[in-house]
Amino acid sequence: MRSDLLSHCPVVATREGQTIDVPPETSLLVVASGLVLSTLVLPHRRFVAFFVGDGDLLPPPVDGNALEALRPARVIVVDEETRRTLLADPDAADEVVNGLAAGLREREESLSHLAELVHRDRVLAKLVQLARKFGRVTPDGIRLDMPLTPAVADAPLVASRHVGKRISLSAIRLANRQMRRAPP
């Protein structure tokens, strides 16, 4: 977001791997820099709900959810008063609505991956989504500069406990081929 109002908002800076401490009076968050994931901790596993990066807007996490930095991150904390002021400015309001709508579309796409019956297809769909959003083209394919450990890569995709490196690696190769063929 480009609004000058954000320059007066507090910023939470975190190192890679840290949970982002969101103040209780938060009304909106803007990722100024870095890569953040939203997680839901269940009794027997952690579920990654979605990934956000530079410029993305998101509501504060609800009970049971947490935001974690996959890379060092700076998150702008917008309180209710500032949010109302933003929404009173037509240009800023347009940015807020468009940013939240883009986030909603991303999350709907992430949820649709869970409908895939074959684990390999879920991994491929998620990798293509991440490559579109966070990847950059290199001579060797699409590069994702994020620590995709099996726990992070498979957490938003797993409907069963079967997770194998070969499946994930072949899905990465497939995703790379698919992204190279995709129109710009």
Image (cartoon, helix red, strand yellow):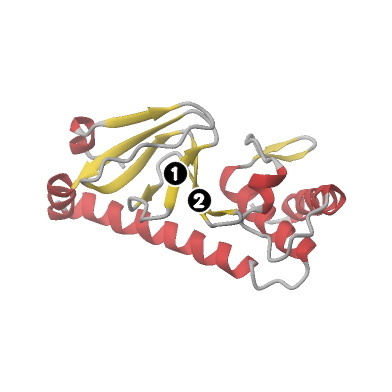
Local packing at callout 2 (Cα closer than 10 Å; few below 14, some 14-19, many 20+) is many
Q: Residue at x 31, y 42 (%)?
A: 1
Q: Are marks 1 and 2 in contact (CB under 8 Å)?
A: yes
From the viewer's perspective, tell me whether residue 165 is left or right of residue 101: right
Q: Nearer the viewer, residue 139 or 134?
A: 134
Q: Rounded to the nearest whole Å, what is the CA distance between mark 1 and mark 2? A: 6 Å
Q: Where does residue 40 sit, x and y in percent of width and height?
A: 49, 54
Q: Where does residue 171 sit, x and y in percent of width and height?
A: 80, 54
Q: Residue at x 12, y 47 (%)?
A: 81
Identify which amino acid the numbered label 2 is placed on.
Thr
Q: Residue at x 16, y 49 (%)?
A: 80
Q: Nearer the viewer, residue 73 or 98?
A: 73
Q: Secondary structure at mark 1?
A: strand
Residue at mark 2: 39
Q: Where does residue 143 sit, x and y in percent of width and height?
A: 70, 38
Identify whether 52 is placed above or below 63.
Answer: above
Q: Residue at x 51, y 67 (%)?
A: 108
Residue at mark 1: 67
Local packing at callout 1 (Cα closer than 10 Å; few below 14, some 14-19, many 20+) is many
Identify which amino acid the numbered label 1 is placed on.
Leu
Q: Where does residue 151 sit, x and y in percent of width and height?
A: 67, 46
